[in-house]
Image (spheres, helix red, strand yellow):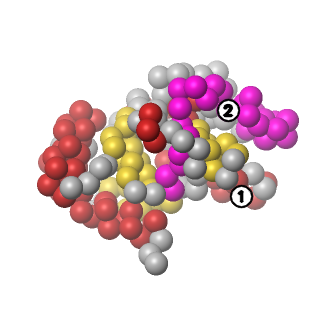
Amino acid sequence: MRSYIERAQDFVKQIFPYLMEANFQRWATQRVVREFNYIYHRKVLFRSGIARFALITSDYVVKYTYDPEEASEVGGGEEEIALYEQAEKDGFAYLFAKVTRFVYNDHVFYIMPRIYGISEGNGYAEYRMTREERAWCDSHNLSDLHCNNYGFRNGHICIVDYACTLEEYDSYESESFITSEEEVSEG
């Protein structure tokens, strides 16, 4: 069986002409994703934040930075890659959805496994972590752990948006990759 990463790469290649048509702009991309869904009988969900959008489907998520200037302020895929690598070294990778960089036609995409249980009712992730987990996140200035930035994997929290590592940042309005209510069951 092919991995979610391989299937996500094929998906990027398939949807790429639509993203080009939208010039990778947030609202135009939302429109072309609806068109893609109609033509290919897919159920790709579009979610966006202040710098990136996410295409959620099957068992993977593809993120793309549509506003590099904003991402330079609040973080993006490269920050997630660096933090994940550090978490692996320190034994905390289980807290995060692994991120994989994929370059296609000179555009950088970030692939993650799909995590379920992302919900407005989750509260802040810090309240679901052990003291050691909170200390590790604090030591890396992981500062945007609201309810829409984590879900659940194997009964434990799994953070899906960990780009923001600013000391004085906490925004409920940051990237919100929440899925619909019928999809928020713990998975």
Image side of residue 94 versus residue 69, left or right: right
Crowding at dot 2, Cα within 10 Å, few <14 / some 14-19 / many 20+, comes out as some
Is residue 10 found left or right of 183 in the rendered image?
left
Q: Position of residue 33 (x, y in %)?
A: 23, 45
Residue visible at 46% across and 42% down? 183
Name above or below for residue 94 compared with residue 176. Answer: below
For the residue labelled by badge 1, is the local secondary structure a helix, a strand or a loop?
helix
Report the span colored magenta: 113-138
Mark 1 or mark 2, which is nearer to you?
2
Furthest residue in direction right, as rendered:
131
Reading the image, the residue beneath label 1 is 88
The answer to which quarter of the image holds residue 186 is top right
Against 119, residue 154 (above or below) is: below
Whether residue 18 appears in this view of the structure is no
As drawn, 167 above or below 28? above
**Residue type at tag 1:** Glu
Q: Label 2, secondary structure: give it.
A: helix
Q: Which residue position is annotated with label 2?
A: 125
Q: CA distance from mark 1 to mark 2?
A: 19 Å
x and y, in percent, of residue 177 in the image: 45, 38
Amino acid on which disc 2 is placed: Ala
The relative height of residue 50 versus residue 132 in the rendered view (above or below) is above
Is 114 part of what is drawn in magenta? yes
* Residue furthest to the bottom: 1
Q: How many C-alpha atoms fall within 10 Å of the one at disc 1: few (<14), some, or many (≥20)?
A: some
